[in-house]
Image (cartoon, rainbow, N blue to C red):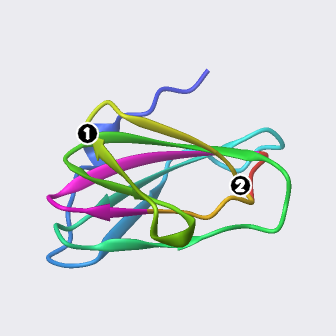
Amino acid sequence: MKKLELDKTRDFPDHGMNRHFLVEDSPFFKIINFNLAAGHTFPVHSHDMDGQLSILVLEGSGEFLGADNATIPARAGDILISDIREPHGVRATEKMRILVTIAPPI
């Protein structure tokens, strides 16, 4: 077992995004914590592979982003589940912390 202390990664840039790798790559999944400044966008992208991902909003609010300019409101406690091939991204309207799980890891 391994305990992770997310409070230790609660730092926000003046602009842009901070990324913290919380779990070493394993054959099964990866967990990454991203902290976005208010107004920052984690651009819509996709990966040419099979698998799934989740994006959990830990703190703050904004929007989940998708193909064709799709937006879904996102606030603390919301989680997006997506195939990894499906376009996905995030826009922060206020300081926002997200936890991304990717399986299998990329």
Q: Which residues are magenta?
A: 90-103
Asked if residue 91 is positioned above or below residue 73 in the image, the reply reads: below
Q: Secondary structure at mark 2?
A: loop
> Does the magenta-highlighted stretch encompass residue 95?
yes
Q: Amino acid at mark 1?
A: Asp
**Rendered location of residue 70, percent (x, y):** 46, 62
Quadrant of image for the C terminus: bottom right
What residue is rendered at 65% in x and 48% in y? 24
User: In this rendering, would 61 be left or right of 67?
Assistant: left
Q: Amino acid at mark 2?
A: Ile
Residue 28 is marked as none
Q: Secondary structure at mark 1?
A: helix
Asked if residue 47 is positioned above or below residue 74 in the image, the reply reads: below
Q: Nearer the viewer, residue 30 or 67?
A: 67
Q: Are marks 1 and 2 in contact (CB under 8 Å)?
A: no
User: In this rendering, would 80 be left or right of 71?
Assistant: right
Circle 1 residue = 7
The prevailing secondary structure element of the residues shown in magenta is strand
Looking at the image, is mark 1 or mark 2 nearer the viewer? 2
Q: Which quadrant of the view contains residue 76?
A: top left
**Rendered location of residue 103, percent (x, y):** 74, 43
Structural crowding at the residue carrying mark 1, measured as other residues with C-alpha within 10 Å and reported as few (<14), some (14–19) or many (≥20)? few
What residue is rendered at 24% in x and 54% in y? 96
User: In this rendering, would 64 be left or right of 40?
Assistant: right
Give the mark, 1 or 2, whose residue is nearer the N terminus.
Answer: 1
Circle 2 residue = 84
**Rendered location of residue 26, percent (x, y):** 77, 44
Q: Nearer the viewer, residue 3 or 33?
A: 33
